[in-house]
């Protein structure tokens, strides 16, 4: 199909609801209801031809066919692993998600956070499936990919060794929604090994279609406690981690049992009365399901002796389960990075609820067209398209503080290397007068991400905020002649 015709066809499909959570795009053309009915009619359990239970589904290097790590693996269905397998028992909870032998703690932290919001969970994990009624060995999940919801089906054959699940498993071993969700995400990304190493916000965004923020906890804003509290109340997903100085430090355990280079879910924030003064607490979860903080406010810490037993029960103080409380001040001292995925582009740093409009642009950067390169290649030009994302700064006083914008750049559909990107403000104008670029610099590159998020503050002390200014933002590759398809949601003027 010619490109213009394909573009029109896609726009028409989107207008009819295709790509919404209620009418997700069928990944690889596989329709869950059709395939399940075929299996029920034939009496044969589903075997996925697109993601077969074979070595290629495991990986290509560390989990490749010749790797010692993949020897002795047997693919089994849940009814072969326990007498009464369940998909979800009594509602999904954080302890349903325990990490196995794959380095995807970032994904598991996102999965655990997802269980805190039942509505969000069941957008990703549809309710119409279990191991009893209409069981056919097929399950389906939905993920947000390049501006639309995609439905992924999988069979329920899971990698095991010695009768135990190799990767994600539940605490009691009889609940399988987590293991099957991990398999569907592995299929979407090519293999299980493709999930080893990543950023929790990648999982957050693929589970919600939300927009992420990052905070350096070495330089936290004074209002960070309020930001975290508001984010949790709004149903946002949060995670944190401790930076490592070398690869050798990855998953090293500190003297107080915190794991470096490891993703933790943030599940709650509270204040307690400690002998007449207010103590701010935060609750975290290690996706391992064990290895917990042993400092102040840990499970057996003496601070709890001063708290009323009813308040302790309300806060869910438990034994070793991977979840623990710590003081917010210790949290800031011990952790390096905070990630928040908001379900809408609301400003979390303001007590005033302010909605922002969202516009999606789809396009392609190609040689001889838009892939002109960055400032290192001024002769190439940027090849600015005719239609650009336009950002209009609000009038002064509409919001307090700075005016952030978000540009999300989604190169390709699979996890893997992405070319370094540059970004600049092109063709900015106020009253017909051209403005100098406010920002030019490299966008952060993470070779395992399929989505790169840029947070650009358009006003600074060095560059006053112009009244009613309009900005066109053009993402470009640092080097000329690189190619990629992209979607660019531009977060612009407040809609309220």
Image: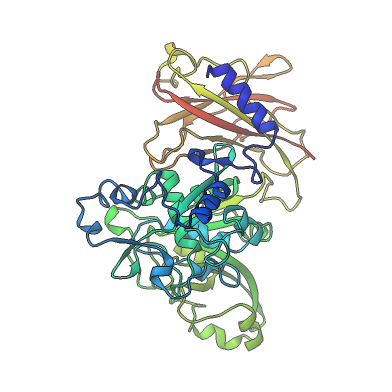
Q: Is residue 240 visible?
A: no
Above or below, comparing residue 443 to residue 6 in the picture: below
Q: Residue at x 34, y 49 (%)?
A: 57
Colouring chosen for the image of the structure: rainbow
Q: Position of residue 468 (x, y in %)?
A: 75, 27
Q: Position of residue 156 (x, y in %)?
A: 44, 58
Q: Residue furthest front?
A: 42
Q: Position of residue 457 (x, y in %)?
A: 60, 36
Number of on-image labels: 0
User: Where, by quadrant of the figure, is residue 376 drawn?
Assistant: top left
Q: Residue at x 64, y 80 (%)?
A: 314
456 and 24: which one is in front?
24
267 and 438: which one is in front?
267
446 and 440: which one is in front?
446
Q: Position of residue 318 (x, y in %)?
A: 52, 81
Above or below, comparing residue 258 to residue 424 in the picture: below
User: Where, by quadrant of the figure, is residue 482 drawn?
Assistant: top left
Above or below, comparing residue 321 to residue 188 in the picture: below
Q: Is residue 327 left or right of residue 193?
A: right
Q: Residue at x 41, y 43 (%)?
A: 50
Q: Is residue 485 visible?
A: yes
Q: Is residue 59 left or right of residue 425?
A: left
81 and 333: which one is in front?
81
Q: Is residue 481 left or right of residue 20?
A: left
Question: In the picture, which quadrant includes the C terminus?
Answer: top right
Above or below, comparing residue 367 to residue 206 in the picture: above
């Amino acid at each position: 199909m010619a490109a213009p015709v394909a573009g029109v066809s896609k726009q028409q499909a989107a207008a009819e609801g295709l790509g919404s959570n209620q009418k997700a795009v069928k990944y690889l053309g596989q329709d869950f209801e059709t395939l399940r009915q075929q299996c029920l009619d034939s009496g044969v359990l589903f075997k996925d031809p697109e993601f077969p239970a074979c070595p290629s589904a495991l990986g290509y290097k560390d989990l490749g066919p010749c790797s010692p790590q993949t020897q002795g693996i047997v693919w089994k269905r849940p009814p072969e692993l326990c007498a009464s397998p369940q998909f979800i028992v009594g509602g999904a909870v954080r302890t349903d998600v325990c990490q196995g032998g794959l380095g995807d703690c970032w994904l598991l932290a996102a999965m655990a956070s997802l269980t805190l919001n039942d509505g969000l969970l069941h957008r990703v994990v549809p309710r119409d499936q279990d191991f009893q009624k209409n069981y056919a060995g097929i399950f389906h999940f939905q993920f947000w990919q390049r501006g639309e919801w995609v439905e992924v089906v999988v069979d329920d054959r899971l990698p095991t060794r010695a009768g135990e699940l190799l990767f994600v498993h539940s605490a009691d071993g009889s609940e399988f929604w987590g293991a099957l969700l991990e398999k569907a995400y592995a299929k979407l990304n090519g293999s299980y090994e493709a999930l080893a190493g990543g950023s929790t916000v990648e999982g957050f965004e693929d589970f919600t279609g939300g927009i992420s923020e990052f905070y350096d906890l070495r330089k936290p804003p004074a209002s960070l406690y309020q930001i975290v509290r508001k984010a949790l109340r709004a149903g946002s997903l949060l995670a944190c981690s401790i930076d490592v100085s070398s690869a050798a430090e990855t998953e090293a355990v500190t003297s107080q049992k915190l794991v470096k280079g490891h993703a933790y879910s943030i599940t709650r924030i509270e204040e307690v009365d400690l002998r007449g003064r207010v103590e701010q607490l935060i609750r975290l979860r290690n996706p391992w399901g064990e290895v917990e903080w042993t400092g102040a406010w840990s499970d057996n810490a003496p601070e709890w002796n001063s708290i009323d037993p009813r308040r302790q029960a309300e806060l869910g103080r438990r034994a070793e389960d991977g979840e623990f409380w710590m003081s917010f001040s210790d949290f800031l001292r011990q952790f390096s990075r905070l990630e928040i995925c908001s379900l809408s582009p609301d400003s979390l740093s303001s007590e005033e609820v302010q909605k922002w409009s969202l516009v999606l642009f789809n396009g392609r950067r190609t040689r001889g067209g838009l892939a002109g390169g960055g400032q290192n290649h001024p002769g190439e030009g940027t090849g600015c398209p005719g239609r650009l994302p336009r950002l209009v700064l609000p009038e002064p006083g509409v919001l307090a503080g700075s005016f952030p914008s978000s540009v999300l750049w989604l190169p390709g559909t699979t996890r893997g290397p992405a070319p370094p990107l540059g970004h600049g403000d092109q063709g900015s104008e106020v009253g017909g007068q051209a403005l100098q670029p406010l920002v030019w610099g490299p966008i952060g590159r993470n070779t395992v991400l399929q989505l790169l998020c840029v947070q650009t503050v358009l006003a600074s002390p060095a560059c006053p905020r112009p009244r009613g200014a309009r900005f066109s933002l053009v993402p470009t590759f640092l080097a000329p002649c690189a190619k990629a398809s992209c979607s660019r949601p531009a977060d612009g003027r407040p809609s309220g």
